[in-house]
């Protein structure tokens, strides 16, 4: 009991890099568990076709908000670290910019969605159009969470983003079931109120902690845009890279195939939780440090998380069909081969995401942007060539090939751009000792 208590206390305190990663991983694990439960219920009540329609309607607000950031969230983190005396002004300026950009994204989505979802039922198109107007809420939520992460308040940001949000979705789903009115449209409509509450909660907390000031706006604009516009390409391309498969399939494939693919993707995404958690912590921790120190931090993080992720991935690959049937029902067992391939892709993606963080932390965001652009371009070309012939498998094959390409490209870029050796991804004895301490004793040493 003392050991368990010590582990819990170590994680909750988040005093070092390893405990912060563990804290974020735990929050993401709870998030994925709640998401899987929500997905399991919607899959059993809606079936593959209803699940596909739900994906088509719910995709757009967060996607367009992320696409419209102009690098604001990453720039906020970087500038908080570089100009700590200007935090209040930077945060106030970011809130103004976020409100304007989020509103613009909502308007663009409202008029463009009917074109992209032309093959969908009219009710799906109309609900998606009105729901996209909440993109401004997603934008402000992202800015507030970025400010809290820059202040290294990962605990609250994790609680809001990864626990409270899916928990409210699950409660909404339970209410719909109790009144026997569950369908894709009602689920979207009912989710708006919890979304508003969540965004207001995180905004109020962030404003209390940082106390935004709306003065010296021009200087804050310059600082935010100087870094933000250079990193915006990475924000935009990163968002497109993570969503391009879903954007493409909702406009091209039938709702049944979209539902099958979504179930496989959501389950496979569980595997990348640890790597994504480590990547989100690494950028704030590594910013403004010497090159060799940043690269060494990155290499250690990549090796440890890669070992743990491969072990977890191999386990779920073996149990894929059984897990899909247990969670989603017999109709979704057909997603098992897709799921196995997507596990490999998520491991590649998570490793690459960690390895890109030094370019952000060392003020070279344009290089990370270029790498994302090359991978995304390769994805789009292969989608166009393969999806009409191979359907959903064409999407998966394209993702795997582009994932390998991105990993190789980022490794090659270290000596060229950072004048440093590429991180060694082969784990050694020290890494396995570190893993043992993390798992068994709750310490990073």
Image (cartoon, rainbow, N blue to C red):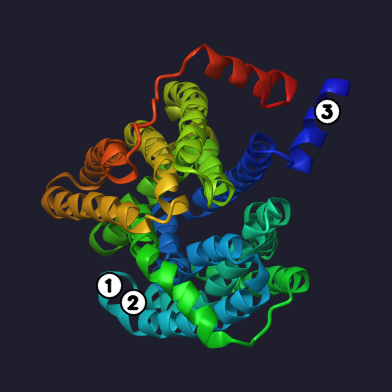
Asked which secondary structure carries label 3, the reply is: helix
Report the side of 22 relative to 278 (left or right). Answer: right
The x and y percentages for residue 400 are 27, 38
- On the image, the x and y values in percent for residue 272 come to 48, 38
User: Which of the labelled discs sits on residue 113, or is there none?
Assistant: 2
The image quadrant where one finds the N terminus is top right
- Identify the residue shown where x is 37% and y is 76%: 125
**What residue is rendered at 41% in x and 85% in y?**
107
Residue 199 lies in quadrant = bottom right
- In the picture, residue 5 is in which quadrant? top right
Q: Secondary structure at mark 2?
A: helix
Viewer-proximal residue, 258 or 6?
A: 6
Q: Which residue does the numbered mark 3 point to in the structure image?
A: 6
Q: CA distance from mark 3 to mark 2?
A: 51 Å
Which residue corresponds to mark 1? Answer: 116
Q: Nearer the viewer, residue 316 or 311?
A: 311
Q: Identify the residue at horizontal 70%, vertical 61% (top origin).
A: 178
Horizontal relation, residue 373 to residue 205: left or right: left
């Amino acid at each position: 009991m003392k050991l368990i208590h010590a582990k819990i206390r170590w994680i909750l305190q988040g005093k070092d890099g390893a405990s912060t990663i563990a804290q974020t991983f735990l929050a993401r694990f709870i998030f994925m568990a709640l998401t899987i439960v929500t997905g399991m219920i919607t899959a059993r009540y809606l079936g593959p076709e209803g699940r596909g329609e739900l994906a088509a309607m719910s995709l757009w607000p967060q996607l367009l908000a992320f696409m419209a950031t102009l690098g604001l969230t990453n720039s906020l983190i970087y500038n908080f670290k570089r100009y700590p005396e200007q935090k209040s002004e930077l945060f106030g300026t970011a809130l103004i910019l976020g409100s304007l950009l989020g509103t613009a994204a909502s308007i663009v989505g409202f008029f463009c969605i009917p074109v992209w979802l032309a093959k969908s039922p009219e009710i799906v198109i109309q609900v998606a159009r009105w729901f996209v107007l909440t993109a401004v809420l997603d934008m402000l939520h992202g800015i507030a969470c970025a400010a809290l992460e820059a202040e290294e308040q990962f605990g609250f940001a994790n609680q809001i983003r990864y626990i409270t949000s899916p928990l409210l979705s699950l409660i909404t789903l339970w209410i719909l079931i109790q009144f026997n009115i569950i369908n894709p449209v009602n689920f979207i409509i009912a989710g708006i109120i919890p979304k508003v509450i969540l965004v207001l909660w995180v905004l109020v907390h962030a404003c209390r902690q940082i106390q935004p000031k709306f003065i010296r706006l021009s200087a804050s604009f310059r600082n935010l845009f100087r870094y933000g516009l250079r990193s915006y390409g990475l924000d935009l391309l990163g968002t497109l890279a993570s969503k391009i498969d879903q954007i493409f399939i909702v406009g091209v494939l039938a709702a049944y195939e979209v539902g099958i693919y979504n179930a496989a993707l959501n389950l496979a995404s569980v595997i990348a939780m640890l790597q994504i958690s480590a990547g989100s912590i690494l950028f704030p921790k590594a910013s403004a440090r010497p090159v060799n120190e940043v690269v060494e931090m990155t290499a250690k993080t990549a090796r440890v998380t890669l070992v743990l992720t491969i072990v977890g991935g191999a386990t779920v690959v073996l149990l894929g069909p059984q897990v899909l049937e247990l969670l989603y029902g017999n109709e979704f067992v057909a997603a098992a081969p897709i799921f196995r391939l997507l596990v490999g892709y998520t491991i590649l993606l998570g490793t690459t995401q960690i390895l890109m963080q030094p370019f952000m932390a060392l003020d070279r965001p344009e290089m990370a942007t270029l790498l994302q652009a090359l991978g995304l371009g390769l994805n789009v070309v292969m989608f166009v060539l393969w999806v009409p012939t191979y359907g959903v498998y064409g999407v998966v094959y394209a993702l795997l090939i582009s994932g390998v390409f991105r990993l190789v490209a980022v490794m090659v870029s270290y000596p060229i751009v950072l004048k440093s050796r590429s991180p060694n991804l082969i784990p050694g004895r020290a890494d396995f000792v570190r893993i043992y301490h993390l798992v068994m004793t709750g310490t990073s040493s």
